[in-house]
Image: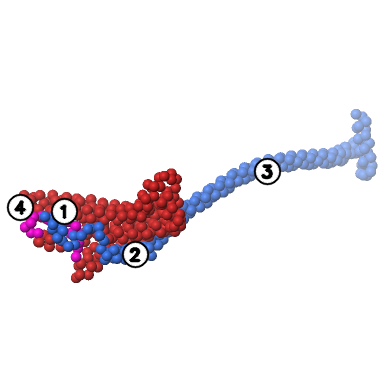
Amino acid sequence: MIRSINLAAPEGANPLIPHTAELIVGAIAFLLLFLVLRSKVVPMFEKAFAARTEAIQGGIERAEKAQLEAQRALAQYNEQLSKAREESQSMREEARAQGAAIIEEMRAKAQEEAARITASAHASIEAERQQAITSLRNEVGAMAVDLASKIVGEALDDQARQSRIVDRFLDDLESSK
Amino acid sequence: MRSLHLLKMEGEGFVPPSTNDFNLPPVFGDNPYTTKPILLVFLSVIVISIFFIMASRKAAVVPSKLQFAGETIYSFVRNDVARDNIGHEFMRFVPYLFTLFTFILTNNIFGIVPLLQFPAMSHVSFPYVLAIFTFVVFHYVGIRKQGIGKYLKDIMFMPGVPKAAYILLTPLELATFFIVRPLTLSLRLFANMFAGHLLLLVFILGGDHLLQGVIGLKLISPFAFAFGIGLTFFEFMVQVLQAYIFTLLTALYIAGALADEH
């Protein structure tokens, strides 16, 4: 019964037979959509993808560059550090050497000074001794003359005679020894 | 339309849905260009265009939600369907495959969208048109790439096969490339949408009919509706899958035509 109803329906044709209107519309609609998507949508999405790839690659490149720079800075810093260490080492050595030289120099100076002081002391002692001898001689002479004149009663005012007498006296003293 | 049928058949019991339910009269007068499937196809073109133009308009590096949704579909077709199957020349075919996928998908999904509820692809004309496009595209690509002589020779006389086998192979290969491929492509899509829609009609209209029966039948009708709802989800899966298969096979045919040997 159902079958007969189906057959009775005029449009109940074979569903595999296409309709002309639908074929035309399908083709036009599809081509229309194709043109819209191809011209408006696909390029924009591709642009976004390219920009994204660019951004990611750029980021990686930037990071690599930064790392390289950091490594270079580290190497530079290490080099500077070792250089500074070397420099301080050499400076210390130099200071030590300089100190030693200064001490040596001071010691030499001090010895020289000491020697000089000793020499001058010797000289002054010698001079004083000479002076003492001279004055002693004079005084002893005068005293002896005084004494002799008192004893002899003879004024020996005359300078030449006086010294002759003194010499004679001294010679006597020496020869009597 | 359906209710007209029911009215007509009142008193004669339940009329199961049939191929007649796919023959929808023009909406405006007698104009054959204003039937429901045709209007739906135009609607799909408008909906897809607006959606993807909105989604891709800004094309920012950091996508908005809308751009992300559009990009997900686009990059699925671009990368998983086109690039993975066609290889380095894939970019030329992305617009075509992308159009194919979105067009079929949207029209299929119209089958379960409330108020629209009709898959245009259940009218065989539309799958025919799409299959013809694919047929033209992949043969054209093959002929452009290899020259018509070598292309046909490779199809008819598959390299690396003993000569005697050509008696069997040549007609088979010719039939595959020129008849079977476009026919299966269109009929697979058509039959899936047709059967799916028919199945939904059976359960929904059946539930409706049960509701008008005696009290015992009224109690059964919710099960019919529940089944109809469950099948709707199933149908959604089939609709997406069929759009994918049609696009994937097109990509594979293009890849085959581009390859040096079949």
Q: Amino acid at mark 4?
A: Val
Of tags 1 and 3, the one toward the viewer is 1
Q: Which quadrant would residue B115 be assigned to in this image?
A: bottom left
Number of residues whose C-alpha sits closer than 10 Å to that of mark 4, classed few (under 14), some (14–19) or many (20 or more): few
Helix, strand or loop at disc 3? helix
At 41% from the left and 54% from the top, the residue drawn is: B257
Whether residue A109 is situated above or below residue A13 in the rendered picture: above
Of tags 2 and 3, the one toward the viewer is 2
Residue holding disc 2: A31
Asked whether the viewer can see residue B150, the reply is: yes
Which numbered marker is on residue B202? 1
Residue holding disc 4: B214
Q: Is residue B81 left or right of residue B145?
A: left
Q: Taken as a whole, is the magenta stretch helix, strand or loop?
A: loop
Which numbered marker is on residue A98? 3
Q: Is residue B10 magenta?
A: yes
Estimate the spatial distance between the alpha carbons at disc 1 and disc 2, rounded to whole Å: 35 Å
Q: Colour of chain A?
A: blue
Helix, strand or loop at disc 2? helix
Name the foreground residue: B72 vs A17. Answer: A17
Q: Amino acid at mark 2?
A: Leu
The answer for which chain carries disc 4 is B
Q: Is residue B241 left or right of residue B12?
A: right
